[in-house]
Amino acid sequence: MKIRKLQEADSIKRKRIVLSFLLILLIPLGLATKLYDGPFSSLLSDKIAGTLYVVFWSLLVVLIFVRKNYLLLVSLVLIITCALEFLQLYSSSFLSAIRSTFIGRSLIGNSFSWSDFAYYLLGSVIAVVIVVKIRRI
């Protein structure tokens, strides 16, 4: 019984290491998509960045709650991201102050687009595929 618990703890540790490594890779990649100013920059900064956003937050939540149901966790990230997209339809001085900064725009967005939902869904699918592969480690 004690060996089984040690094996489980070791497995969780390995999963957390892999998830942490991927998160570290996603940070500069996500920032690069937001800062890129060349051909297809609007596709990268608006759409691909949204996909990476969902992947990042999904992996972070799975890292924190590694023993919980990953499908539920990724679904919650998707729901919250979609709620943030709808929040972009609302304007207030508080939200405008947040959106006036680069980090604020990157985290909560500044313009509503129906097409963003497809990229959020894609990010969720990618996150699930990654987590399934990591769980097999």
Image (cartoon, grey):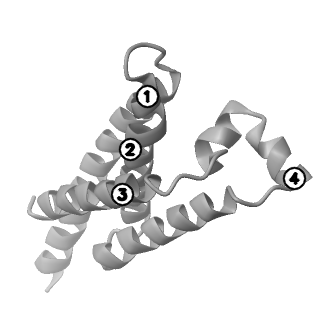
Q: CA distance from mark 4 to mark 3?
A: 28 Å
Q: CA distance from mark 2 to mark 3?
A: 13 Å
Displayed quadrant of residue 10: bottom left
x then y, percent, for residue 137: 10, 58
Identify the residue position indicated by label 1 in the image: 33
State the quadrant of the N terminus.
bottom left
Q: CA distance from mark 2 to mark 4?
A: 26 Å
Q: CA distance from mark 1 to mark 4?
A: 26 Å
Element type at mark 3? helix
Q: CA distance from mark 3 to mark 1?
A: 18 Å
Q: Is residue 44 above or below residue 49?
A: above
| Precedes in sequence: disc 3 or disc 1 | 1
x then y, percent, for residue 88: 67, 55
x then y, percent, for residue 108: 64, 50
Label 1 sits on what residue type? Thr
Whether residue 13 can be seen here: no
- Name the front one of labels 2 and 3: 3
Label 3 sits on what residue type? Ala
- Name the front one of labels 4 and 3: 3
Element type at mark 2? helix
Q: Which mark is residue 94?
A: 4
x then y, percent, for residue 89: 70, 59
Element type at mark 4? helix
Identify the residue position indicated by label 3 in the image: 118
* Identity of the residue drawn at 38% across and 23% down: 40
| Precedes in sequence: disc 2 or disc 3 | 2
| Precedes in sequence: disc 2 or disc 1 | 1
Q: Residues within 10 Å of mark 1 (few under 14, many from 20)?
A: many
Whether residue 27 can be seen here: yes
